[in-house]
Amino acid sequence: MMEDGRDFPEEFLWGAATAAHQVEGSNVNSDWWAFEHDPHTASVESSGDGIDHYARFADDFALLASLGHTAHRLSIEWARIEPAPGEFSAAQLAHYRRVLTAVRDNGMTAFVTLHHFTLPRWFADRGGWTAPDAIDRFEQYVRHVCVGLGDLLEHVCTINEPQMVALHGYLEGYHPPGVTNPTLWKRVGRTLLAAHRAAVRIVHETTGATTGLVVQLPLLAPAREDDVTGQFCAQMQAEIVDLYIDGLAADPVDAGDWLGVQYYRKNWVDPASPTIFAPPPPGVPTTQMGWAIHPDGLRVMLHRAADARLPIYVTENGIATEDDLERISYLDGHLRAVAAARAEGVDVRGYLHWSAFDNFEWSEGYRPKFGLIAVDRHHDYARTPKPSAHALARVARTGRIDALHDQHLTPEAT
């Protein structure tokens, strides 16, 4: 703890994250819309109208700012901006200008993600990230966005969780395109890393924004203590973590200006499992997603991320639960992990919780509740901040983790 009693300095950024497809609704031109309407995929329901954020963004940002948020991470939707190859929508670009202006007008720093899982359907239909000119097509989209929105861009996230795009989409078949191919899995991961580098060059050429890759870094461990399982765990570590952290360190010119770290769980790797991962051992607390809760893993993975030699923002971290007291406990453990990493020398500059709102959670649909703010999709999408939203607001305003539990503080202080 610092001399003034704070766990985090005044300049530390606080906020939450959203992704366009998960909140906007009616993203009908994307590969995800097609995937979730195909009865043969892993998706359990349609995203539908989302949480109507496309229309309500201004009120949503005002609400987040009122909860002490000084930053917000959001994505812009490639499928809306470029609905056909080379055909860019001026109206959609104007919409995102209004979105980014509203973030700025509410006093929040925007972290803008260019690619958050979804692709235009035309891009997916021609091979997606396996197409020979995939990076070229991505570059054209990035350049158009940077030229059109560059004056409103402060921090740009190039690609969200490239290793999960590759893992879920090309090895597990859990996300589009629903493929289970070990060769394509590795190939796509490397393509996405190259696409990140290309996007960094364009952002730097066309804007004054900083930019970074956003990676999910689970803490991986072998499910059993034997050589085969250990070797398989090392292989998974190489593809999910090392490829990206070491790849950025090896190319500092195009690595970007910072690294976004996203952490949710400890994973036990099992070569005998059809899903690659074993369930958590008995007695380990889990979330609605079945993910193991292991706060110290965030501290460990922040140290691993520091090997990229870039400043770090925690760009996602959160829990799916119906029990909001559990969310506050989760925040306590994971914020202490961030504070410990900072005290140990890791340059962490902000924390963005996943997620701002209960929303569409990809193949899991609307069942998992990650949000600081509840959304009643059956009654005009009414927003209701949960106690955890006010608890995090107290931390943002005081810099103290213990403020999570200071319920006696006045509304003005929260």
Image (cartoon, grey):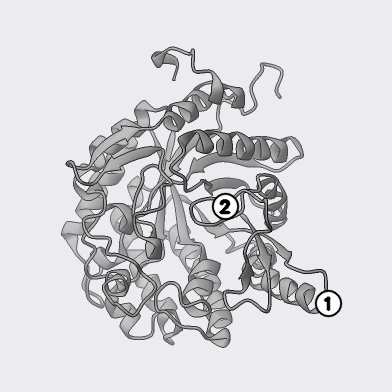
Which of 331/393 is in front? 331
> Is 45 located above or below residue 412 in the figure?
below
- x then y, percent, for residue 136: 40, 78
- x then y, percent, for residue 357: 36, 43
The image quarter in which residue 242 lies: bottom right
Residue at the extreme front: 282
Helix or strand or loop: what does disc 1 sit on?
Answer: helix
Residue under label 2, please give it.
Answer: 264
Residue under label 1, please give it.
Answer: 227
**Residue 400 appears left or right of 230:** left
Query: Which comes before the other along the chain, label 2 or label 1?
Result: 1
**What kind of residue is marked 1?**
Asp
- x then y, percent, for residue 276: 61, 74
Q: Nearer the viewer, mark 2 or mark 1?
A: 1
The residue at the point 56 percent across, 46 percent down is 314
**What kind of residue is marked 2?**
Tyr
